[in-house]
Image (spheres, rainbow, N blue to C red):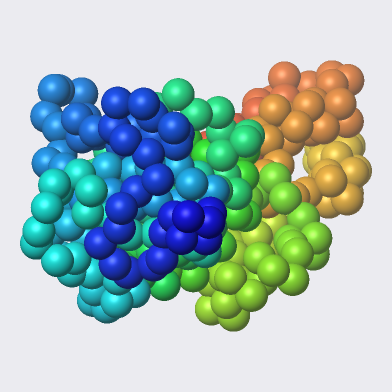
Amino acid sequence: MSSEDNAPSSGNSLPLPFDHGSGSLPVSSVFGPTGAVTGTGDNHIPVDMILLSSDYVVFYTHEATLLTASNNSFRNLLPLPKRGDPLNRAVFVPEISSPELEVMLQSIHNVPRGGFSVGSDIEPVMKGVARLWECGISPRDCITPTTHLYQYLLFCAPIHPLEVYALAAQYGMVSLAVTTSSHTLVLDLSEISDELLRRMGAIYLLRLHQLHMERTETLKEMLVGELGLHNPTARCGFVGQRRLKENWNMAVASLLFLIKPDTTTSLIREKILEYTADLPCPDCIGLRDSLLSKIISKWSVTRRTINV
C-alpha cells in the first residue's frame, strides 16, 4: 500500500497511521490520551476523538465540546460516525499547524497555557485565535476575563502591546483592549505595521490615537498652570517673585519638547527642580512645591486606557 493510501483525509473517520502504544506520531503533551487537565485541579476533559494537525501531531479532544462551541460544525468536519474505538475517530485538519491547534483547544476547553515563554508564543497565539473564527468559534465568547488564555494574553500585553491590542480589537474583546491600551503609551503609533492596522480597524485605532493625544495635551495644560503669589516680604517682593515665574516657564519650555503619553512624574519633578533649584526665597519655594505636587498628583491619576 502506498503512503498516499495511509494518509488521513479531512472530515472522515480514519484509520490512523500509528497505534496508541507505539506512538509513531508525536502526541500533544497537553492534549494526550488521558485528556487535558483543566485548571489547577485534577479534572480531565473527556476524550472521544482525535484531531491531527497539518504537521501530524495528535490531539485528543471531546467532540461534543467542539460542536457546542462552533456554529459551523467545526468547519463542517464534525460530527464523526459513532462507530469503532472512540480513540480511532479522527479528523485531519491540513491547514492548521500543531501550535495553532493547541491554542484553539486551550481556548475551547479552557486549559492553562503553562510552560510557554512570552517572547516565542505570541505569533502562534494570534494565528490560533484566527483559526477559531474560521472554525465557527467566537474568540470573544471563549476568551473571557475568567479564562486561562485571556490571562495569558494579559501577561503578554506588556511585551507585545500592539499585537494583543490588535487581536482584542479585531474580535471585539473590549475589556482586553482597554487593559492592553495602557501598555501602548510607550510606543510611537506612527510605526504600527499595516497588518496590525488592518487587524485593529479604524475605530480602535482612533481610540488609541485619542488616548495618546489627550494625555499629551492634558499634561501640557497642567504645566502652564498659575503659580500664584505670596505676600511680599522684606526679602522677596513682587519683583523677586518674577524670578520664580521666569524659571518655572523655562522648566516648562524644556519639558514641552519631552512630553509623551508615558511621561513619568520623576521626569517632571527633575526638570522643574533643575530650573528652580537656586530660588533664595522660602515662600517662592513653597509656591513651586505646591503647584508641582498638584501636577504630579493629577498626572498620576490621569486616564491611561482607551474610552469605549
Does the image show residue 231? Answer: no
Vertical relation: 108 (above or below) 214: above
- Foreground pick, 167 / 289: 167
Does the image show residue 3? Answer: yes
* Image quarter (top left, top right, bottom left or bottom right) of the C terminus: bottom left
Residue farthest front in this picture? 1
Q: Residue at x 65, y 60 (%)?
A: 212
- Foreground pick, 151 / 211: 151
- Foreground pick, 84 / 177: 84
* Relative horizontal placement of residue 216, taking residue 126 as reference (left or right): right
* Relative horizontal placement of residue 99, taking residue 8 as reference (left or right): right
Q: How many marks can you see?
A: 0
- Foreground pick, 143 / 297: 143
Q: Residue at x 88, y 20 (%)?
A: 278
Image coords of residue 10 (percent x, y): 39, 67
Image coords of residue 299 (percent x, y): 57, 44
* Relative horizontal placement of residue 38, taking residue 6 as reference (left or right): left
Image coords of residue 157 (percent x, y): 53, 43
Q: Quadrant of residue 30?
A: top left
Image coords of residue 50 (percent x, y): 28, 49
Vertical relation: 78 (above or below) 144: below
Q: Residue at x 32, y 69 (%)?
A: 11
Vertical relation: 52 (above or below) 271: below
Q: Residue at x 59, y 65 (%)?
A: 208
